Amino acid sequence: GESVGLHLPTLSVQEGDNSIINCAYSNSASDYFIWYKQESGKGPQFIIDIRSNMDKRQGQRVTVLLNKTVKHLSLQIAATQPGDSAVYFCAEKDRGSTLGRLYFGRGTQLTVWP
Amino acid sequence: DADVTQTPRNRITKTGKRIMLECSQTKGHDRMYWYRQDPGLGLRLIYYSFDVKDINKGEISDGYSVSRQAQAKFSLSLESAIPNQTALYFCATSDPSGRLYNEQFFGPGTRLTVL
């Protein structure tokens, strides 16, 4: 089965609110995680990444939190905007993989209401 | 100009037909990937190539074949298409020497329908 998955397939938020998208993983050997955003009709685009030796990483309006104890990853979007509406995927890489293969979760559809 | 391009963007075909999806990149990356996306299943890896002489099967390679014609080109073929290969197909590239050496850059996708 999949080693990377999402708790909720859909999330609806009001414009201006903060969004939190969750991801659970089962491979304790994963050492690198990425969040991708996929807008309708487009390919996935990189948002932010985090290595397993970190707990938190911040970007512009986005923060990724990693809890290795419970194998949980989250993406926080501050002041969510209509343009944030998309499907969000988490992906992981196994520490033992020198080949750079990523394993993707099923995705969460984020809808932002005005 | 797009760094990773895919052709065609949409294709409707019939069961049993041979189909080729093409991917080209101008990023100069050695690594290229083909993924399939189905609703609710996320992205699943079909094949990947780490250089022109290297081809590897992914999770769901049955019914597919690939060709790495050059560093910049990676084609995916369905030898005899079947309806359950109806999906959205993405090509991706990555650069192992870059800072984000695990980041993959995706093309816009090809929507394939097999009737």
Image: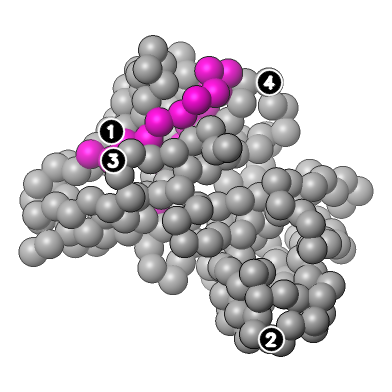
CB under 8 Å between discs 3 and 2: no
Q: Are discs 2 and 4 located on one and the same chain?
A: no
Is the residue marked by circle 2 packed among few (<14), some (14-19), or many (20+) residues within 10 Å? Answer: some
> Which residue carries the number 2 mark?
B13
- Picture disc at residue A21: 3
Which dot, 1 or 4, sits closer to the camera? 4
Question: Residue A93, how many percent across, how many down?
Answer: 58, 31
Q: Residue at x 31, y 55 (%)?
A: A109
Q: Chain of mark 3?
A: A
| Magenta span | A20-37
Q: Earlier in the sequence, mark 3 or mark 1?
A: 3
- Distance from disc 3 to disc 2, alpha carbons, whole Å, reads 37 Å
- At which x and y percent is residue B44? 61, 51
- Inspect the magenta stretch and tell me whether residue A105 lies in it: no
Mark linked to residue A96:
4
Amino acid type, callout 4: Gly
Instruction: State the SS at label 1.
Output: strand
What is the CA distance from the residue labelled 3 to the residue labelled 1? 11 Å
